[in-house]
């Protein structure tokens, strides 16, 4: 049952105008395109926001955590200065001060006679089966008992 057109309506209606009760195809297509565009632009936005973090991670920077926090702050506060600072930190190589200072500390401990603390990043050295005491001669290798004879002489 086709309803007659309103007398004032033009006889040739455009294709995007639907009859009452029919599905508006144009609205469905535009809705799908809009959802796809929002997801695409959101993905691009997040990729750009994580750019400094990915740069710092790829080049094994020491300041990786600082760059990651600055990127998150920029994302949630919409303050672009954090992102710019994170980008600059990701590009700059900060000098490694900890390795020379650790070496100096180990040398000073060795000069003071304090055994250096083992480095947690290195494997522990193999322990020898027989260790000699630091104070005197090794008596474990003397089966005859020369050390007792030397004490009587």
Image (cartoon, rainbow, N blue to C red):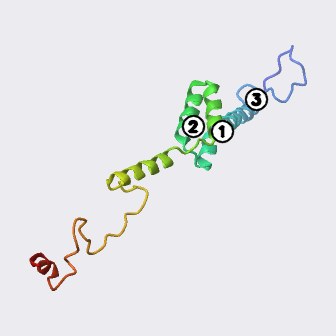
Badge 1 or badge 2: first in the primary sequence: 1
Q: Which label sits on residue 103?
A: none
- Residue occupied by mark 2: 67
Mark 1–mark 2 Cα distance, whole angstroms, equals 20 Å
Quadrant for the C terminus in the image: bottom left
Q: Is residue 135 above or below residue 11?
A: below
Q: Nearer the viewer, mark 1 or mark 3?
A: 1
- Residue occupied by mark 1: 43
Quadrant for the N terminus in the image: top right
- Residue occupied by mark 3: 1
Q: Nearer the viewer, residue 130 or 12?
A: 130
> Mark 2 and mark 1 in contact (Cβ < 8 Å)?
no
Q: Is residue 96 above or below residue 70?
A: below
Q: Residue at x 58, y 49 (%)?
A: 60
Badge 3 or badge 2: first in the primary sequence: 3
Can you tell which quarter of the image residue 52 is in? top right
Can the viewer see residue 23?
no
Mark 1–mark 3 Cα distance, whole angstroms, equals 48 Å
Answer with left or right where residue 14 lies relative to residue 90.
right
> Mark 3 and mark 1 in contact (Cβ < 8 Å)?
no
């Amino acid at each position: 049952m086709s309803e007659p057109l309103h007398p004032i309506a033009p006889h040739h209606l455009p294709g995007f105008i639907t009859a009452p009760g029919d599905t508006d195809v144009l609205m469905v297509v535009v809705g799908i395109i809009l959802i796809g565009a929002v997801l695409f632009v959101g993905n691009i936005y997040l990729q750009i926001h994580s750019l400094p973090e990915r740069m710092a991670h790829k080049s094994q920077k020491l300041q990786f955590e600082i760059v990651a926090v600055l990127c998150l702050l920029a994302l949630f506060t919409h303050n672009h200065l954090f992102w710019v600072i994170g980008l600059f930190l990701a590009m700059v190589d900060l000098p490694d001060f900890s390795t020379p200072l650790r070496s100096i500390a180990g040398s000073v401990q060795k000069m003071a006679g304090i055994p250096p603390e083992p480095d947690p990043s290195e494997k522990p050295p193999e322990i020898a089966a027989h260790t000699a005491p630091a104070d005197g001669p090794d008596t474990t290798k003397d089966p005859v008992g020369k050390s007792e004879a030397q004490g009587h002489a």
